[in-house]
Amino acid sequence: MAKKVVATLQKGQSKSYAKVIKMVKSPKNGSYIFKESVMLAEKATEFLKKEE
């Protein structure tokens, strides 16, 4: 499945997209949650810097 996603992201203009995974600590019980998103590569650093 991952190979298909990577192959799809590398065609045409979609090369400027990146899959971003961020680890966030849950305020309820202190465990970590992973937030996953596909976005433009330029906005990836903003997503990672944004505190939630």
Image (spheres, helix red, strand yellow):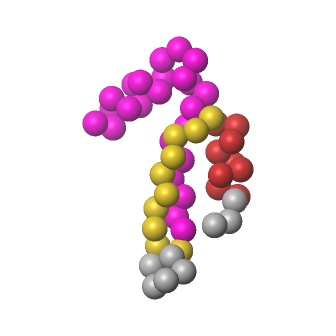
**Magenta run includes residue 17:** yes
In this image, 52 relative to 29: left or right?
A: right
Quadrant of the drawing holding the C terminus = bottom right
Q: Residue at x 51, y 46 (%)?
A: 37
In this image, 16 relative to 38: left or right?
A: right
In this image, 17 relative to 36: left or right?
A: right
Residue 25, position in %: x, y? 53, 74
In this image, 19 relative to 3: left or right?
A: right
What's the magenta region?
1-24
Please tell me whether residue 30 is drawn above or below residue 19 in the rendered image: below
Quadrant of the drawing holding the N terminus = top left
Q: Residue at x 41, y 31 (%)?
A: 6
**Which residue in the rendered view is the most extreme toward the left?**
1
Please tell me whether residue 3 is drawn above or below residue 50 in the rendered image: above
**Magenta run includes residue 20:** yes
Of residues 22 and 27, the one nearer the viewer is: 27
